Image (tube, rainbow, N blue to C red):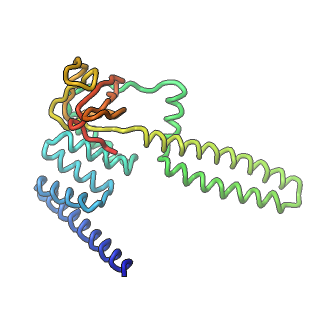
């Protein structure tokens, strides 16, 4: 009985989510962007999330000239689908409407090399590649075990070694990618204007003045303050209500 009730509730939730999404699309096509936002937001309230939903919501906010919510939802879409070119393109357009011009300091050296490599695929993709390589390794092992010819055994052994090496590399890439995903905490400034402080108190000196739509990274939380880092490496404290974390 509980299973039937669960299936019914889940089906109802999916129905209302799909209905709300389609309503949002219809409102957007008619140019009713505020109604589209309301419809898409109603879908989020059902705990239904998708890259397409956040993308459409970002587009709606962009049409309403609401920079911070537009950038925030594009970033949310990219968390679910990092390689989507259309979302990346629209995000760039939205970022051009921000006031702050903060340079991004690129990583250099070995750390940059590792990041470039792990960023080739999402960490889940690396994990699936590892599963495939483990299957290849098993196949080579079986071939080595049952082969009667010395040459074949040698080839299967080499294949085992190569598959094992690639397996280890992919597992490490998956672990590194997952670690970067968990530890990196991007956020978007939602306040029209927010002051970055040197310490978590109002009386401390001012480091920088941020405006809505700027992307930052959360490093630490203390009471109603958050320590953040800008893309140029500048660090400081900001009131937590001034920003909204993407993940």
Q: Position of residue 117 (x, y in %)?
A: 53, 38
Quarter of the N terminus within the rendering: bottom left
Residue furthest to the top in view is 205
Residue at 21% over, 65% down = 22
Which residue occupies 40% across, 38% down? Answer: 184
Answer with left or right where residue 84 lies relative to residue 237.
right
Q: Is residue 189 above or below residue 2?
A: above
Residue 168 visible in image: yes
User: Compared to 54, does 207 lie above or below?
Assistant: above
Residue 51: x and y in percent read 33, 54
Query: On the rendered structure, is 85 left or right of 25?
Result: right
Name the one closer to the observer, 116 or 89. Answer: 116
Res. 205 image quadrant: top left
**Please, is residue 225 above or below residue 53 in the view?**
above
The correct choice, above or below, for 62 with respect to 189 in the image is below
Is residue 95 visible to the viewer in this orientation of the structure? no
Query: In percent of the image, x 32 and y 30: which residue is there?
Result: 228
Residue projecting furthest to the front: 223
Instruction: Tell which residue pokes out farthest to the bottom in this image.
Output: 1
Image quarter in which the C terminus is found: top left
Total count of labels:
0
- Classify residue 25 by image quadrant: bottom left
Question: What residue is drawn where x is 17% and y is 35%?
Answer: 191
Residue 121 lies left or right of residue 228; in this view the side is right
Horizontal and vertical percent for residue 76?
31, 47
Image location (x, y in percent) of residue 39: 17, 60
């Amino acid at each position: 009985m509980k299973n039937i009730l669960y299936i019914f509730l889940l089906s109802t939730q999916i129905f209302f989510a799909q209905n709300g999404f389609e309503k949002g699309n219809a409102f957007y096509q008619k140019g009713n962007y505020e109604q589209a936002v309301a419809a898409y937001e109603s879908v989020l309230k059902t705990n239904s999330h998708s890259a397409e939903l956040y993308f459409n919501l970002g587009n709606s906010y962009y049409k309403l000239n609401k920079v911070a919510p537009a950038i925030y939802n594009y970033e949310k879409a990219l968390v679910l689908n990092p390689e989507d070119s259309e979302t990346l393109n629209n995000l760039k357009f939205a970022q051009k409407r921000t006031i702050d011009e903060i340079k991004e300091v690129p990583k250099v050296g070995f750390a940059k090399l590792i990041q470039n490599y792990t960023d080739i695929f999402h960490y889940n993709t690396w994990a699936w590649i590892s599963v495939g390589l483990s299957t290849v390794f098993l196949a080579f092992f079986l071939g080595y075990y049952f082969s009667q010819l010395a040459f074949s055994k040698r080839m299967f052994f080499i294949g085992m070694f190569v598959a094992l090496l690639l397996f280890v590399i992919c597992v490490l890439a998956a672990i590194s990618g997952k670690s970067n995903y968990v530890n990196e905490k991007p956020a978007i400034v939602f306040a029209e204007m927010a002051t970055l402080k040197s310490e978590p108190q109002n009386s401390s000196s001012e480091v920088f003045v941020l405006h809505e739509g700027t992307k930052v990274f959360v490093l630490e939380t203390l009471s109603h303050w958050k320590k953040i880092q800008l893309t140029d490496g500048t660090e400081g404290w900001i009131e937590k209500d001034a920003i909204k974390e993407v993940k």
